[in-house]
Structures are given as C-alpha cells and as structure tokens.
Amino acid sequence: MLTKPIIGITGNEREMSDIPGYYYDSVSRHISEGVKNAGGLPVILPISEAESAKAYVEMIDKLIISGGQNVLPSYYGEEKIIESDDYSLERDIFEFALVDEALKQNKPIFAICRGMQLVNVALGGTLNQSIDNHYQEPYIGFAHYLNVEKGSFLEGFISGDFKINSLHRQSVKLLAEGLIVSARDPRDGTVEAYESRTEQCIIGVQWHPELMLHQIENQTLFGYFVNET
C-alpha cells in the first residue's frame, strides 16, 4: 500500500457562541476535502506555542497555511492604519514559527489568502494594509479574471478565461526577494499568486481555491501541491 502524504493545515480558533470563554480549533472543511481528493491525509495544526513548531513540521510531509485574520503590521515594520481587531498575535507567532521550520526542514508550503500574506512577510516582504474592491459580497461566486504569468507553475492548468473569488482586504505590497509573481489581478495588478525562486517549494494564492473545488483548476491546484511538490 502506498503511503499517503501527510498535509498539515494550520487551524484557527473560534469562541463557542453558546459558552462564552470556551474556544474550539477550526479549519475549513473544504481545504481538507481538497487535500483528500488529491490523495493526501489532512491533519489540523492547532494554534500552539512557537516551541512546538519544530515537532509539528517533523510529523508532516507538507504544510498549508490557511486563511483568516490580518497579519499584524509590526511584523513588516509598520503601525496599524486601519480600525480593525481582526488580528491574532498568538496565531501569527505560531505560523511564523511553522514557516521558519518548514524552510529549515525543506518541507513544501502552500499558502492561501492570509497565508500568502504571512509567508511573504516571513520572507521579508510587506503588505498593503487597506485596499478597495477586493472583498466580494456575497462571498459565493466569482469576482474577476486571473492573469497568469508565462512560465509560472499555474500555466500548466489555468487558462486565460479562469475566474476566481476575492475575499481579502489586504494584499502583497513589496514581494519578498525569494519569490516571483505567478499571477495578477488584471484590473489593478494586485499579486494573486506567487512561487519560490529556489528549489524550496513555496506557492501562494490570494483567492480561496477550497471554496471552488467544483472547478477542475482549483482541485488540480491541490493535486499539484499534494503530489508534485
């Protein structure tokens, strides 16, 4: 029997609505489905102390940094310029530690939405703290087309008429030195995907492919990460 690759997926933390003060660990079921459909074995990595990151990364084959809160701007040398409490210092600390360990252990990284922003910051990049016209309502459906760069990892399975969702209020500003742009929003040039310049596999997308697994391209994206990186 072939061993399925173990894919660690970073979890979030939510307060129970009917029991104030009690929290549960959560991750999008659709990310897990994308991994399982591709033949991987998804494992949730709950928010934990940074010291535990090494052990978590050792037990997995590949790492997915999932979506969620904004990344605290202090990590890229800025003060907060927006009125928002959508931050989690505890999660930031843990996920930066996971990324650092994944790089040290040469484990592939797939970063989604917030994850894409966090990995960019971890590698020395910066973010736009507030952008317009990139958070669609309702959140189900498509927002805009995608311009895929020639030669990128996406070119093999995404065509020119591919549309994505858009559920982010921040974006990549300065792309980290070790990354290259894989795709942009044709409306304003916003970075929608990147990949690493080196043999260390890092891919990031700004949209939420897990919410559109009915599109073969999005499921193929999970398949690419699980089986080809």
Image (cartoon, grey):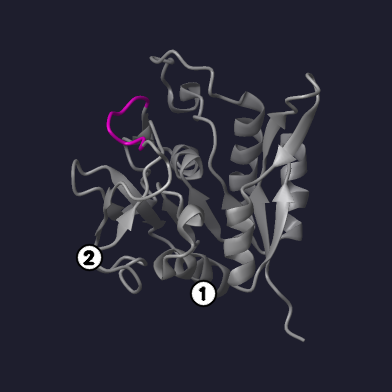
Disc 1 marks which residue? 228
- Is residue 140 among what the camera can see? yes
Query: Identity of the amino acid at label 2?
Result: Gly
For label 2, the crowd category at 10 Å Cα-Cα, with few meaning under 14, some 14 to 19 and many 20 or more, is few
Residue 219 position, x and y percent, is 48, 67
Is residue 130 rendered magenta in the image? yes
Q: What segment carries the magenta color?
A: 129-136
- Kindly check if marks 1 and 2 are in contact, taking CB atoms under 8 A apart as contact: no
Residue toward you, 36 or 117: 36
Badge 2 marks a residue whose secondary structure is loop
Q: Which label sits in the foreground, 1 or 2? A: 2
Is residue 54 rendered magenta in the image? no
Query: Which numbered circle lies on residue 204?
Result: none
Query: Identity of the amino acid at label 1?
Result: Glu
First-in-chain label (1 vs 2)? 2
- Is residue 48 among what the camera can see? no
Residue 10 position, x and y percent, is 65, 46
Residue 119 position, x and y percent, is 49, 43
**Predominant SS along the magenta part:** loop
Compared across the picture, whether 168 is left or right of 19 comes to: left
**Residue 182, above or below 133:** below
Badge 1 marks a residue whose secondary structure is helix
Residue toward you, 126 or 220: 220
Q: Residue at x 48, y 57 (%)?
A: 202
Disc 2 marks which residue? 160
Q: Residue at x 33, y 49 (%)?
A: 192
Residue 121 position, x and y percent, is 45, 37
